[in-house]
Amino acid sequence: MNLVDFLINWIANAPVTAVPYALAALGLIVAERSGVLNLTAEGLMLVGALAGAGTSLLFVGHPAVALLAAMVAASVVSLLFAVLVVVLRINQVIAGLSVVFFCQGLTGLIGTLAKWQNKQLSGLVPLKIWPLSEIPVIGRIFFMQDPVVYLTILIFIAVNFLLFRTMLGLRIRAVGENPAAADAAGVSVALHRILAIVAGSSLIGLAGGYISVVSVKLWVTGMTGGRGWIAVALVVFARWAPWPALAGALLFGCIEALIPHVAAAGIRVPQYLMLMLPYLATIAVMIWVGAKDHRGSQEPGALGQPHVREERR
Amino acid sequence: MASALQLVGIRKSFDGALALDGASFESQAGEVHALLGENGAGKSSLMNVAAGLYAPDAGSISIDGAPIALSGPAAARQHGIGMVHQHFKLVKPFTVAENVLLANPQPHFASGIRNIRAAIEQQVGELKFSIDPDRRIDTMTVAEQQQVEIVKVLVGGAKILILDEPTAVLTDAEAIGLLEIVRRLARAGTAVVLVTHKLQDVKRFADRVTIMRGGKTVAKLDPRHASAEELTELTVGQTSALPERSPHEGGPTRLNVGTLCYTRGDGRVMLDNASFHVRAGEIYGIAGVSGNGQAELAEALIGAIEPSSGEIWLDGTGDISRAGQTKRREAKIAAIPADRYAYALAGSLPISDNLAVAQIRSGRYGSVVKLDRAAMRQDALAAIADYDVQGVRSVGQKASLLSGGNAQKLVIAREFSREPDVVVAHSPSRGLDVRACAAVHQRLIAARERGAAIVLISEDLDEVLSLSDRIGVMSRGTIVGEFERPADRQAIGRAMVDHG
């Protein structure tokens, strides 16, 4: 196996590993732009993964149905988080963590009871964009991916437009920056925060469903393996902006895609060291973010702060 | 003619504390109507009700004689009520146009921004403002941000313009410019409500004035036919004058601060060889323009920061500049910090705990294993009565629920309970109304009469002049001049700004 083949195989696989990071990070950005510190990604990805796998096993339909089920399931569970932090104004870190633990337990239980563990799913066929797919090297990397990879790029364009070029986006960002100002301007803080959480969570659910239905084609308990946490770190790295989040997701996708290829190429590196790579990269990225200056960060001004209108100081 | 805005019998309470107690207000189109009152009189609360932000517990609102119900700020805007809040309601990273668009929604973002930009430019032209619709709010000065707020309200077509303490953040020249614009708006038919606690704004710019006190409307009159004294008395109720002070006797030196230096974490020198001494039975005032090291001096004196060099020498104890709080307590220093919620009170703890904590080691409230709650309660009740702390429903109530003036009285009650030899007071009357302020000053004078050495650090020159026996002027981290009582205000003012 020569080096060029190795590189092409590796890079061609990167989008598949990058999609869950990208979608989950984007979903988190939508919620956090409304001022809600969202740590639920790991849990909601598991919900999406289980719902996608379950739908595929129960009703043998098009995988698109399974992915849709993943989005809906994560949105429904995220309503619980929305009620906790927006209506009851519970500390957003605590609420986020408890939702993650709740989802981990719940998905494990349902997956085992329904006997969905380790059952092969049909998956999605890559979409060849002919004739571009016949171009050497570039064709393999860019034009022979599964439909969700292309859809992800469309979703990024759509969310970017929604956040920065629509009234709804203006309101969501205003609620995240200065809820008191948005409130005085007649914008419902609670409504827009709930909406941002639920809409963002559908993307996180899609990220989870993609892992089980498209990428691994199995349900295994706890199969997201910390990707949700990496997405949380990605949001900080991307400074709450969609396109840098996509770039960061590609970086992590490349790192994760490297793991099986190194083993397949017969390079002798301890397996556990390789599996640790994404987390090492996360720590390195966080250190880099912490060390550079913070000008230009788009961190929402009211991130993590509940809003009460009639509060006395 | 029906009133443009009429509020009748408005009641509103927050967590059981009554903020508005049957307050009423009415204003006509074409007039500037001032709403005058002290901090906490309920002016802002009443206007927040009119702006739809607070839902009243009782009372009625009518516009042009027709009763209305306000479901929220958006409904108030539809009725032509616009409010410029004291703390601006602007989204900092947004541009002017985006902020105005947020408050005046349009169906589509792109065309909305275009329409709003045109509307802003029209208003800016009429008002002779100089704001660019595409500038970000966080690059603008406070006065410019205020212009944005006014434009925002006028673009929405407000017929009733409420300005909450608009001159508080402006220089004198800016304030006059603003109030002239306000007069012009009134001439054009707008009903302007000017919420303020400044008498001169009322005298110069208002056609009528409504005065509030303790959540109630107490008077409504024409300011041109009332003297400043009458207005003050109506706003404040009766006040007590400062107690008589015995002539200064120059006791022994109690506190000596010698060549105190402190460099902040970012490398800026905040204290640069500051030296002064305070005798027993003396109030030593420190005046100066804010940010010349007064905050750091106060923090060094109360032990919140450790000076890099120099000494704080106490009669009978020695140098305490690096001593811990226990040793300072033993040396009988009382601290009244500027930020009472950061340094002086634990807001979420009960009042009784806040009072008892200073003497917890003395054994007065039980030992390490047993806390004597009854004694704490008894002492707390005595202190509350003695120091006239208002708004206490029980001694188990959280300290943070007290208003500013009463929280300050609580701090003083605790600090003075041990009959201190040295008192360090930093801006002790900041944010307090006239009556609470007078109470604090009486306590300081009483401590002086008892023979304590008092350091009074304040940016309010009137406070320093009226209380101090000697005044040190602080500039660039050091004392640049000392003045004996009665001090010349002009000379002190010059010393504050001339140095260097």
Image (cartoon, coloured by chain):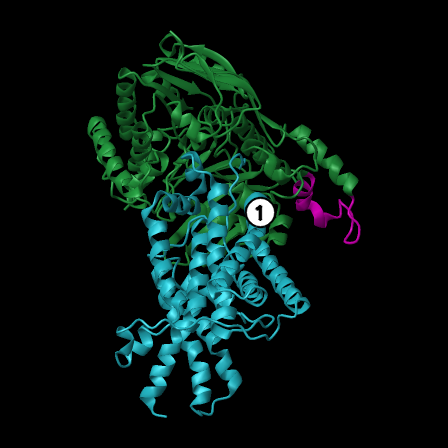
Chain colours: A cyan, B green
Q: Please state which amino acid type lies under the numbered disc 1.
A: Val
* Disc 1 secondary structure class: helix
Q: Position of residue B379 (x, y in %)?
A: 73, 36
Q: Which residue is mark 1?
A: A83
Residue B219 counted in the magenta span? no
| Residue B415 visible within the image | yes
Please give left or right for residue A78 compared with residue A125 in the image: right
A188 lies left or right of B289: right
Q: In the depicted view, which residue is nearer to us: A155 or B340?
A: A155
Depth check: A33 or B269 in front? Answer: A33
- Residue B3, quarter of picture: top left
Residue toward you, A37 or B114: B114
- Chain identity of mark 1: A
Question: Residue at the front extreme?
Answer: A60
**Is residue B286 visible from the viewing direction of this image?**
no
Q: State the image coordinates of residue B285 (x, y, percent, origin top left).
A: 45, 37
Instruction: Give the class, few, some or many, for how many residues have Cα within 10 Å of label 1's Cα (few <14, many ≥20).
Output: some
The quadrant holding residue A139 is bottom left
The spot of residue A267 in percent (x, y) is: 44, 91
Image quarter (top left, top right, bottom left or bottom right) of the N terminus of chain B: top left
Specify whether A99 is left or right of B47.
right
Q: Residue at x 29, y 31 (%)?
A: B151
The stretch drawn in magenta includes residue B359: yes
Q: Which residues fall within the magenta stretch? A: B352-372
Does A216 appear above or below B175?
below
Q: Which percent across, then down, holds residue B323?
A: 57, 56
